[in-house]
Amino acid sequence: MTLIDPVLLKSRLGAMAGRFDVDVLAECDSSNSELLRRAEQGAPAGSVIVAEQQTAGRGRRGRQWLSAPATSLTFSLLWRFDGSAAKLSGLSLAIGAGLARALEQLGAQGICLKWPNDVLLRNGDDYAKLAGILIELASDRRGTQVVIGIGLNLHPPAGDLPQPTAGLSQAMGTLPERHTLLAAILIALAEILEIVTVNGFFAVKNEWQARHAWQGQAVQLLADAETPLIGRCLGVDADGALLLDTGTSIERIFSGDVSLRRHG
Ligand code: BTN
């Protein structure tokens, strides 16, 4: 398979090309780890690493992230926020909304979001994971930097995986050309990051909630070594916290370090 060509990608990025500095690696441990290392050495905001193959891809909650080169798109983007990290609440949800927006603009259907930042594909009453997002902070004296890592399945992954998975090919008739796809995602992410920087997650909340897979449904929330919390999912608030109606109270869940499942 041919690698992403940064020159061709620039032409697809059009007027936004100057905002990104793209490096394409045939192989690395993890595009997030590599970009965190480069951020420490002063890499500019807008740096992007596309990895055709990751030998130690990382997922949320310390999990591994496995992806095969020809069947997925894996990359990380470095973004810089001035000022406090408080502005970052809801950032991971906003990134999910930006990714969903880009895929829909390219013609994908059935894209849904699961708190905090899974991108799912709906198939009837069932949902399968289409993309994962891993956001890591790298603050320094210049402000707060975030590394936003995205793993998008282009085709359904093979093998025995712990949860149902889907590929973008199942959401649209013909897959977009890879440079067109990556450019559309980067542009949508830049747009949504700018909105969040200026107005906070509040400005993206309705867009996120319109795609929320389990709005109004019974869910079960599991944090390590705690009894599960069961309730009806009311969506998210202006800070991106999940609202769970347990019958006796409305719980606000801030930590994405939990596992959320449909209940019943
Ligand atoms: C999840 O657990 O759902 C998040 C998965 C995030 C995977 C992407 S692939 C590109 C980037 N590099 C990594 O090591 N992880 C993220």
Image (cartoon, rainbow, N blue to C red):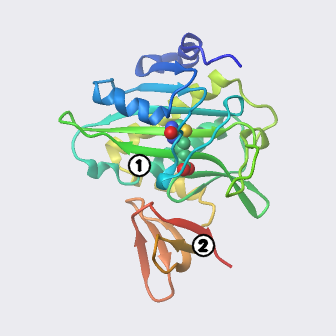
| Residue 216 marker | 2
Residue 98 in view of the camera: no
Relative placement, left or right, of 58 versus 147 is right
Q: Nearer the viewer, residue 67 or 245?
A: 67
**Is there CB contact under 8 Å for labels 1 and 2?**
no
> For residue 251, which quarter of the picture?
bottom left
Residue located farthest toward the top when viewing the structure as drawn: 7
Query: Please, is residue 254 above or below residue 93 in the view?
Result: below
Question: Residue drawn 45% across and 39% down?
Answer: 148
Query: Is disc 2 surrounded by few (<14), some (14 to 19) or many (20+) residues within 10 Å?
Result: some
Provide the residue designation for mark 1. 91
Question: Residue drawn 48% across and 17% down?
Answer: 15
Query: Please, is residue 183 above or below residue 8 in the view?
Result: below
- The quadrant of the image that shows the C terminus is bottom right
Query: Is disc 1 surrounded by few (<14), some (14 to 19) or many (20+) residues within 10 Å?
Result: many
| Residue 51 marker | none
Q: Nearer the viewer, residue 111 or 15?
A: 111
Amino acid carrying label 2: it is: Gly
Q: Position of residue 87 (x, y in %)?
A: 30, 49
Q: Nearer the viewer, residue 23 or 214?
A: 23
Q: Earlier in the sequence, mark 1 or mark 2?
A: 1
The answer for how far apart the CA atoms under marks 1 and 2 are is 23 Å
Relative placement, left or right, of 191 versus 144 is right
